[in-house]
Amino acid sequence: MTFNHQINQIADREFGRVNTPPVNYYIGLLTAIPNPDGTGVVEVSSVGTGYERQVLPNNKTALTPSVNGQVFNVADVTFPVATASWGTVVDVGIFDSLTGGSILYDSTQPVGKPYEVGDIAFFDIGDIMWTVQNIQD
């Protein structure tokens, strides 16, 4: 899903407003599927859990070329070892900053996966898909 914040950013870039895309995006793990307006984001806690968002360079080597508005990761994505329970991850988000910031896209996972102490969240090449799409209210 493409969230309203990012749709506005894309439109601003497309229609000549000054709006430079970020050098990096940040991949985060979510334990709930956010609302289309970008609210309801429930990310794994970074307090005492070993969790942190992973950097996704915004360049031609980090994602596949877009086909029908879809792009996939072209490198493995590995998160740190969980030092406490992360809960059940059901969604993967792309954010515009390492902490806080706005969610731009998400990739709902076909099956939720629980992460407990000692687990490592790992996504192979092509496991994560993001779609740029029009959101209908």
Image (cartoon, grey):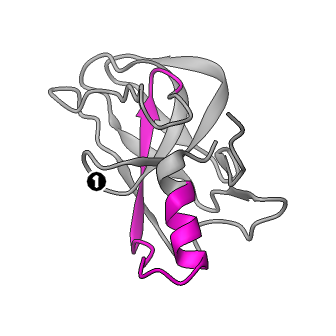
Report which quarter residue 110 is drawn in: top right
Q: Is residue 57 above or below residue 35?
A: below
Q: Is residue 42 left or right of residue 15?
A: left
Residue 74 horizontal/vertical position (percent): 64, 62
Answer above or below: position of 23 versus 108.
below
Tell me residue 19's x, y (percent): 42, 77
In the structure shown, which secondary structural element does the residue marked by tag 1 occupy?
loop
Q: Position of residue 107 (x, y in %)?
A: 62, 39
Residue depicted at 42% across the width and 25% down the height:
40
Question: How many numbered dots are placed on residues in this image?
Answer: 1
Magenta range:
7-33
- Location of residue 61 by image quarter: bottom right
- As for residue 23 lying within the magenta part, the answer is yes
Residue to which mark 1 is pinned: 98
Amino acid at dot 1: Leu
Residue displayed at 53% across by 84% down = 16
Left or right: 98, with 31 as reference point: left
